[in-house]
Amino acid sequence: MHARIDAIYRLSFAIVGDEADARDSTQETFIAAWRRIRELRDPDRFDAWLQRIAVNAARMTLRSRGRRHVREIPSGDVASLAAVSDSAKPERADEDLLGAALARLSLDQRTILVLHHLEGHDVAGLAEILEIPVGTVKSRLYSARQALQAGLAAEARRP
């Protein structure tokens, strides 16, 4: 169970960017899951169902707190997201550059990148978690990558 809690915390933290908010969001995720467990039709899909609840809880946490930025991404995860950019190595630390570029993204863009590149979900898994068609996932993932590349390029030009 601890592994599941840790995974939901990491997902929440990557979306909300704040430890306290991530803890709140994680707690809200498990409370909502407990309340809605009867809605789970296929127990084999529990993890996707729980992650969908976690994404929604993180969104609600951001909305209730009025925060729209990511302050920190764990350094071990930087390489995973930085790999989506073809940009040359910046002078600033990769972690700082990535954090600033992620802050430029919308909540939806950040969420889909985190779920795909950090959590390792494929397109079908993203469609299930986000409850959108596969074609929409592909389109949003492409747009989010383009926005991240543009943000990385803009941040690399900053002194």
Image: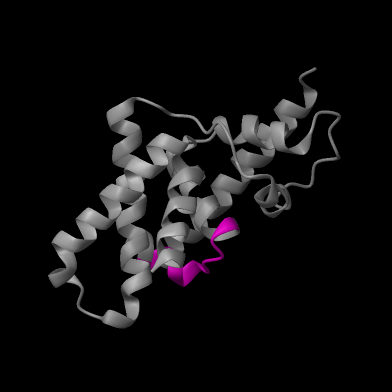
Q: Can residue 156 be seen in this view?
A: yes
156 lies left or right of 9 = right
Res 132 → quadrant: bottom left
Residue 34 in the image, given as x and y percentages of width and height:
19, 62
Q: Of 133 and 44, which appears nearest the observer?
A: 44
Q: Which residue is drawn at 69% across and 45% down?
A: 75
Q: Of 95 and 140, which appears nearest the observer?
A: 95
Residue at the extreme top: 159
Res 66 → quadrant: top left
Residue 119 in the image, given as x and y percentages of width and height:
54, 61
Q: Residue at x 42, y 56 (%)?
A: 8
The quadrant of the picture occupied by the N terminus is bottom left
Q: Can residue 133 be seen in this view?
A: no
Residue 81 in the image, given as x and y percentages of width and height:
66, 50
65 lies left or right of 156 = left
Q: Residue at x 74, y 32 (%)?
A: 153
Highlighted magenta segment, given as a residue range: 118-128
Q: Is residue 45 magenta?
A: no
Q: Of 11 and 20, which appears nearest the observer?
A: 20
Res 90 → quadrant: top right
Q: In the picture shown, does residue 145 fall above or below 96?
A: below
The quadrant of the picture occupied by the C terminus is top right
35 lies left or right of 116 = left
